[in-house]
Image (tube, grey):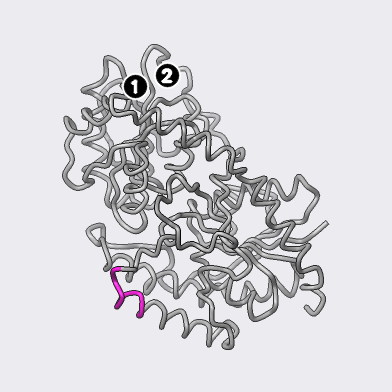
Amino acid sequence: MSRFLLVAPPLTGHINPLVAVAAELTARGHQVEWCGYADRIRDAAGPTAVVHECALPEAGELLRPPTLTGPAAFRFLWEAFFIPLAEAMAPAVASAVHAFRPDAAVTDQHAVAGALVCERLGVPYLTSASTSAELIDPLADLPKVAAWLTGRLDALREAIGDPAATHDPRFSPYGVLAFTGRELLGDAAALPWERVHLVGPAIADRPGDPDFPWDALDPSRELVFVSLGTANTDAGARFLHEAAGALELLADRVQGVVADPGGQLTDPPPGILVRPYVPQLELLGRARAVVSHGGHNTVCEALWHGLPLVVAPIRDDQPIVARQVAEAGAGIRVRFGRVDAPKLAEALRTVLDDTGGHRTAAAAIGRSLRVAGGRQAAADHLEQLVTAHPAAAAGR
């Protein structure tokens, strides 16, 4: 039996893949503990998850102006959240390592404290890349932003990591678990494939919703799932209203289920189910298409189920993920801030009817993602890491 420490930020989309990996490791007889934010982790992993609690930065949760996009949004994300988060998490990560004495760790790509503390304390670790965006170097055309981020990461390393290390802490020298597939990455020939393990989405059981009205679903109509994730409630009001309008235009053949955690749709058209939270994986198993902001987890889980997408990216990695979906032929990209109900309805008709081959492409990508191995493949790589470094925990 080995001991694995999982380090995650307080972001649901980053936690969910690791929940599946943790479940697989536990099923194999290994011991798993977490370092992060107990409420978020236990909401996803269950109440028995062992969590070494971290402090939040002074700013608390991630809050951004809804109009902030592009390079400015990227810089804001790191300056206002990820860098302070690393500084706030570092003491707890170090305490967790000393208390738990893990044989190896998995550190989320954006919980940089995990990587820096592990390198300083000699813990072998794999990076968890919950999005494919940074695998293709999104700052290649923004050298000033790239140089700024490198400087900030170097300063973090001086403070909490090993100053002698030289690698980018977002990419472990031991390897990267990338929860995506080669078909979505496109032209990524420059990746160090010996270190980047494309394992596809990590699918596992999640807490259900006993109150979800399954009997309200109409089996004679095609189910379309609409979600902007859990971090975009500030920006999503207009789009969700247009999406509800599109679903109403297609009401003769489509039934929509809309995830609306911010309560934006106060008066939806009849026949559309609007819920603050939904059992997403169960819904995807019944759906025929997905309307999404391009969140990486939702996109990969939809494709894993062979579902075509209409993607309306807002910011961060979403434009990159949306481009990957469109270039792979598995969906249609629309403009988040400008698309209206008729255009959304037209895009939905196209993917539902497969007139552009989107369903066929999504099904093919789904088959390849399932072959990638998901949580089982991720656990295999972690076991191999411990085998390759059996004495790593001896000095702690």
Q: Residue at x 60, y 52 (%)?
A: 18
Q: Quadrant of the N terminus?
A: bottom right
Figure check: 205 above or below 44: above
Q: Residue at x 23, y 23 (%)?
A: 248
Left or right: residue 17 compared with residue 216:
right
Q: Is residue 147 visible?
A: yes
User: How many other residues sit within 10 Å of disc 1, few (<14), some (14-19) or many (≥20)?
Assistant: many
Question: Farthest residue toward the top?
Answer: 220
State the image coordinates of residue 189 (x, y, percent, origin top left).
Answer: 45, 58
**Prevailing secondary structure of the magenta residues:** helix
Q: Nearer the viewer, residue 71 or 260?
A: 71
Q: Find disc 1 in the rendering and name its residue.
A: 255
Question: Farthest residue toward the front?
Answer: 189
Which stretch appears magenta? 141-147
Q: CA distance from mark 2 to mark 1?
A: 8 Å
Figure check: 87 above or below 332: below
State the image coordinates of residue 285 (x, y, percent, origin top left).
Answer: 50, 27
Residue type (three-letter) at the residue carrying disc 1:
Gln
State the image coordinates of residue 370 (x, y, percent, origin top left).
Answer: 57, 37
Q: Secondary structure at mark 2?
A: loop
Indicate which disc residue 148 carries. Answer: none
Q: Residue at x 58, y 45 (%)?
A: 202
Q: Find disc 2 in the rendering and name its residue.
A: 217
Q: Nearer the viewer, residue 364 or 243?
A: 364
Q: Secondary structure at mark 1?
A: strand
Figure check: 383 above or below 218: below
Left or right: residue 396 compared with residue 374:
right
Residue type (three-letter) at the residue carrying disc 2:
Leu
Labelled pair 2, 1 in contact (Cβ < 8 Å): yes
